[in-house]
Image (cartoon, rainbow, N blue to C red):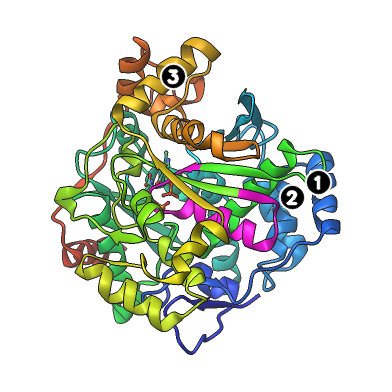
Amino acid sequence: MQYISTRDTGATPASFTDILLGGLAPDGGLYLPVEYPQLTDATLTHWRQVLNTEGYHALAAEVLQLFVDDIPAEDLKAITARAYSYPKFASEDIVPVTELEPGLLIGHLSEGPTAAFKDMAMQLLGELFEYELARRGEHLTIVGATSGDTGSSAEYAMRGRAGIKVFMLTPAGRMTPFQQAQMFGLDDENIVNIALDGVFDDCQDVVKAISADAAFKSEHRIGAVNSINWARLMAQVVYYVSSWIRATETNDQKVSFCVPTGNFGDICAGHIARQMGLPIDRLIVATNENDVLDEFFRTGDYRVRSSSDTYETSSPSMDISRASNFERFVFDLLGRDAERTADLFGIKVRQGGFSLRDDPAFADAADRYGFASGKSIHADRVATIREVNEKLGVLLDPHTADGVKVARSLAPEIDTPIICLETALPVKFAETIAEATGSEPEIPARFEGIMEAERHVLDLPNDAEAVKALIRERA
Ligand SMILES: Cc1ncc(COP(=O)(O)O)c(C=O)c1O
Ligand SMILES: N[C@@H](CCOP(=O)(O)O)C(=O)O
């Protein structure tokens, strides 16, 4: 499988392992497969059998083989077996699916080492990086941005790995105490935590600015762990497949997914699975008060917000107003028109956004691509956590609660079961859980003592040059 950038009008093909290490495309675009592999009924039947008899890691190897042709199949199998194992993931199913109430299921994506869905891809990325760097005899300097979960997930996946150094940008003061403890409590030689004076979007902009400096990128071998890296999305396609298998008995049954959304990475993987022919009915975008994407799917207007207009909410990991992966979807929506995509995301987004309201393609977002959307605010989130806990005995984290709220509000117009993807565990968001239920969530045994560890973090201004100077000094 070859890959192209969303902004490359020449559609210059690149191989999987090159883009794995390269991250962002040199033109500032994001990589996508030249074409999506197409699933047959026989493949779905085979995959159903593989998941049921050999487990999640074996299914992952099957899915990945469709996207990766420059790693031998046997090696890929060993890689997925290392990435998705029990008890590293707290459930032997890796991604269990349970019924919350009739017609609404939960896909549990947060059983991994850091209790967030990011582990699903990051555990694989750690294995892939180490494998490919050893094969090439190279090293990688990862520069990442987090609103709270990508950071710890990446650091747990990369700590102690040969040839990898991680510089992680966090929005100063915006993460929960548990999220801070998870990251800043690490004292590994190859991990550098940075508290940047800005919001997540500023951190993400700095990452992109550093990647856009071709000389610096090449000199320091800069790579990416954010969902701008195609491998993150590829790994996430697997749990759409496994969740569909677990929720159905035959291949003609469809399900819908409701996905708490910030950087549009999780749901973009669902879009790709649907484009491959996985029987997905609707893809529901659930946003918090930072509702740029909900507004787009309702109106066709994509109005990015400034940092000062990005609200600090009680589902903080979704406090994002410039969603990177939205570019991947719009590229598909516009018939893979790279010139237009480059204009919209390279120029118009910097000027405040764009509108597809009058473009015939906009209707396709719902009709052809199955998208729907909704928004959940603090009061909805807290009421949902409280009500689900009291009536159903299930404790949701604030982001998953946003998903459940939106799924319930759209359920009357959707004919298929909805799987709401659980994106984190409550333990990370104690304050909001206490507000909703009157008591703080229990700390699972594997996180005991985490709050007491000494903190390791450097303060920096919101300035790519300052981050580059630190990388020069420490890499
Ligand atoms: C807990 C949690 N939920 C939801 C999201 C949204 O995921 P995405 O950015 O892939 O849309 C994130 C991160 O952005 C997250 O950390
Ligand atoms: N929610 C994320 C921010 C988005 O990061 P991405 O790596 O998924 O692009 C976080 O918690 O850091």
Query: The residue under label 2 is which amino acid type?
Result: Leu
Name the residue that disc number 2 marks. Answer: 59
Could you tell me which residue is drawn at 72 percent across and 56 percent down? 61
| In this rendering, position of residue 212 left or right of residue 393 | left
Give the mark count: 3
| Crowding at mark 3 (Cα within 10 Å: few <14, some 14-19, many 20+) | some
Asked if the beta carbon under badge 2 is closer than 8 A to the nearest atom of ligand 1, the reply is no
Question: Which numbered disc, 2 or 1, marks the residue that appears first in the sequence?
Answer: 1
Res. 130 in view: no
Q: Secondary structure at mark 1?
A: helix
Name the residue that disc number 1 marks. Answer: 48
Question: Which numbered disc, 2 or 3, marks the residue that appears first in the sequence?
Answer: 2
The image quarter containing residue 183 is: top left
Name the residue that disc number 3 marks. Answer: 443
The image quarter containing residue 228 is: bottom left
Could you tell me which residue is drawn at 33 percent across and 73 percent down? 344
Query: The residue under label 3 is which amino acid type?
Result: Ile
The residues tagged by marks 3 and 1 sit, at their Cα atoms, a distance apart of 35 Å
Q: Which mark is residue 441?
A: none
Q: Quadrant of the C terminus?
A: bottom left
Query: The residue under label 1 is which amino acid type?
Result: Arg
State whether residue 149 is above or below residue 220. Answer: above
State whether residue 266 is above or below residue 300. Answer: above
